[in-house]
Image (spheres, helix red, strand yellow):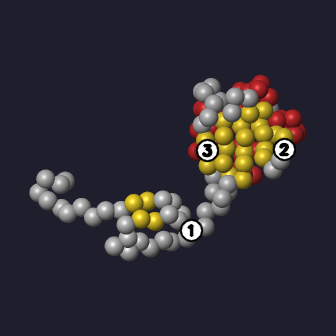
Amino acid sequence: MLKYLWRYPVKNKNNILKKESGNYYIDINELTENKDLAKTILFEILTDFNFSNKIIDDVIRSLDGTSGKKFYSETHRLIRDRDFLIVTPGKEYEGQVYYIDENTKEINDPISLQFSIIERTKDLK
């Protein structure tokens, strides 16, 4: 059984995973055909895109839910669509540090934020 279990994902990976326009599509119907192997199959596929085991568990739980849920790895994004799990390249974390001066009122890169200084009073907790 164990030998079969580990050969199944590799053998059937091409039936479940399709590449189109730089994105990868995982057929949910094909994936859930054998619920016992779904996690193993997803693990085989999604570890190639740097998804952690915890995220893969969350993806599995989402298969019975509604579409639109998003999951992220360091390098990719996965969107749970009605019929497919769609894996797209994401912006890789750059680890860049941004310093904000105490007089700064607004920044627009890497995200738009506005700042204001609030004086601490007895009522402020």
Compared with 26, 109 (above or below) is: below
Query: Which of the numbered marks, if any, corresponds to residue 46?
Result: none
Percent x, y of residue 10: 84, 42
Few, some or many C-alpha atoms within 10 Å of disc 1 (few <14, some 14-19, many ≥20)? few
Q: CA distance from mark 3 to mark 1?
A: 20 Å
Residue 20 — which label? 2
Above or below, 66 against 16 in this view is above
Comparing marks 2 and 3, which lies closer to the viewer?
2
Q: Is residue 37 visible?
A: no
Q: How many marks?
A: 3
Kindly identify the residue that appears in the image at 67 percent across and 54 percent down: 90
CA distance for labels 2 and 3: 20 Å
- Of residues 31 and 36, the one nearer the viewer is 31
For label 3, the residue is 71
Residue that appears at 66% across and 36% down: 80
Q: Amino acid at mark 3?
A: Phe
